[in-house]
Amino acid sequence: MAGLLLAVRFTADLIFAPVIGAVSDRMGQPKTAILLAVVMFAAMAGAVVTPGGWVIGYLVVVFICGAGLFVTLSAASSHIAARSAVPQLFIGAFTTANDAGMAAGPLLVYALADITGLSPVYLGVLALLLVSVWWFWRVSAKNRRVI
């Protein structure tokens, strides 16, 4: 099962990230990010409450949306960095924060899961994701020339 999900995750990055990037270029990064976050939220909620084999289908959707969000928000950060006074500092901070989150995130999630169970942790992380995308959309709406 773990091998299947890892294969889906990396396949989602290879196949769907370029497609979602093209959609993001047409729709706009804020709208694409919000759409992906909402679909990811629905799929994560489905994975939490659905028993049996449907969980895998929901997790496939989560991985595809995750790949799309990564591409969309990375492109947005590149646009912001290109207009900043010190682009390399901006990209360095963004990359470091992203890498730290990827490294520490699973450790923190599984530590919390021991206390609360996986379902509340998944929903909490997804709520944080939605807030982050909403904040991105809010800031980009105020400053349309940047994104």
Image (cartoon, helix red, strand yellow):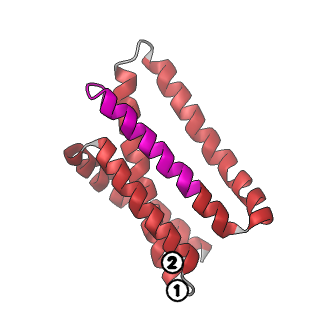
**Which residue sits at x=52%, y=31%?**
94
Under circle 2, the secondary element is helix
Q: Position of residue 123 (x, y in %)?
A: 58, 62
Q: Residues within 10 Å of mark 1 (few under 14, many from 20)?
A: few
Q: Quadrant of residue 146?
A: top left
Q: Which mark is residue 56?
A: 2
Say if the magenta span includes residue 59: no
The N terminus appears in which quarter of the rendering? bottom right
- Relative to residue 59, is residue 132 depicted above or below? above
The C terminus appears in which quarter of the rendering? top left
Q: Amino acid at mark 2?
A: Ile
Q: Is residue 105 left or right of residue 52?
A: right
Tell me the magenta residue range: 125-147
Under circle 1, the secondary element is loop
**Which residue sits at x=55%, y=49%?**
128
Residue situated in front as seen by the camera: 138 or 31: 138
Q: Position of residue 102 (x, y in %)?
A: 61, 47
Q: Position of residue 28 (x, y in %)?
A: 25, 43
**Which residue sits at x=41%, y=12%?**
85
Q: Which mark is residue 53?
A: 1
Q: Would you say residue 13 is visible in this rendering?
A: no
| Contact, mark 2 vs mark 1 (Cβ under 8 Å) | yes
Q: Residues within 10 Å of mark 2 (few under 14, many from 20)?
A: some
Q: Amino acid at mark 1?
A: Gly
